[in-house]
Amino acid sequence: MDYLDCIATFTKVLELSSFTKAGRNLRISAAAASVQVNQLESHLGVRLLNRTTRCVAPTGVGLEFYERAKRIAHVLERAEAAIACHSGHHQGVIRVMTSPSVGRRIIGPSIPDFHDRYPATQVRLRSGDHRFDFSKDCIDLAFGFVRPTGSIVMAQTVTKCEMVLVASPIYVQRHGYPLSPNDIIAQNHACFSSKEFHTYDNVWPLTTPCGATSIEVSSPYVADDGDTIVDWAVSGHGIANIPLFEVEKFIRSGDLTVVLPDIRPLAIELQAFLPKPMFCEPRVALFLDFTLNKYSATTAIAGDLQPSR
C-alpha cells in the first residue's frame, strides 16, 4: 500500500463523512477509498472508522489519529506547492478562513477569478468567528475585522470599509427619527451591532461634522453575524450599526433608510492575518497579493447611500 495515499484518503473520508464523496474529491472510486482505509487500519492494527449504511464516523482512536494526520498532509501539500513554485507553476491547496460576511460578500466572489488565473490551485474557504488556531485548524490565511484569538499572527490591512447607521422606514415612523446622536439615547432606541465587525460592545464611536464622539446604546439582543443584524433592522426592530456593503441594496430598495447621514460610525479595517511571515508559502502570498490588488483603494468597499428612484 501507499501509506501517504491511505492517510490522505482516510482524512478526506472523515472530513466528508462519506467514502463516495471522498472518492469523488480524490478522483478515485468509493470502493478504492474503502480499500485504502482498510489497508491503513490493518497496518495500524486499530479500527479508525465506524461504518454504517447511513454514515461514517471516527472512533476515538480514529479522531486522535486524524488530528495528527491532517497536519502531516498539510505539511506535504505545502512542500509540494513550494517545489512547484520554483518552476513558476503555482499549484496546491490554499486554506482560507473568513468571518461569515467577509466570506459571502468579499472573498468568496473573488475566488473564481483567482482560479481562472491559477487553475492548478484550489482555494478551500471556511467561514467562522475569530476563535480558531492556524496550526490546529491548518489555516494558511484568514480575513476579517477582528484579530484571531489563540494565535500569534501578523496582520496586513486590505482596505477600509464604511459603516452606516440604518433603520427601516416602519421603525422610524413608529419610534421617531433621531436628529442627533444624543436622540438615539434619549428616545431609547433599540440598537444592534455585531462583533463580527468590531470588538466594542454598546459604545459606538462616531464621526460628526464637529469631530469624534461616542454614545452608549441599548441593545435588547445580540448576534455575532452581520446577516442577522440586517434582518432585524429590515424587520423594523431597531437601528443597526453595520458595514455599508452589507446594506447598500436595502438602502437602494427603500427597505432601509440611513439614520443621521452626516454622522458616521468609524470605518473598520478589513485585515489579512497570517500565522508567521516564514509560513507564507508562495501560493498563499499569491492569493494575498491578488486580494490586496483587488481592494487596494483607501475605501474600496463603500457604496451609494441614495435609494433608487
Image (cartoon, rainbow, N blue to C red):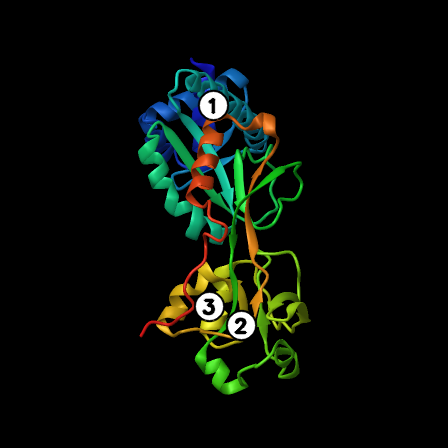
C-beta proximity under 8 Å, tags 2 and 1: no
Q: Is residue 107 above or below residue 90?
A: below
Q: Nearer the viewer, residue 137 or 159?
A: 159
Q: In this rendering, would 292 be left or right of 134? A: left
Q: Is residue 302 above or below residue 192?
A: above
Q: Which residue is mark 3?
A: 231
Q: Position of residue 241 (x, y in %)?
A: 55, 66
Q: Secondary structure at mark 1?
A: helix
Q: Which residue is mark 2?
A: 262
> Of callouts 2 and 1, which one flags the residue occurring earlier in the amino acid sequence?
1
> Of callouts 2 and 3, which one flags the residue occurring earlier in the amino acid sequence?
3
C-beta proximity under 8 Å, tags 1 and 3: no
| The quadrant where residue 277 appears | top right
Give how far apart the Cα atoms at labels 2 and 1 are.
51 Å
Q: Which residue is mark 1?
A: 77
Q: Residues within 10 Å of mark 1 (few under 14, many from 20)?
A: some
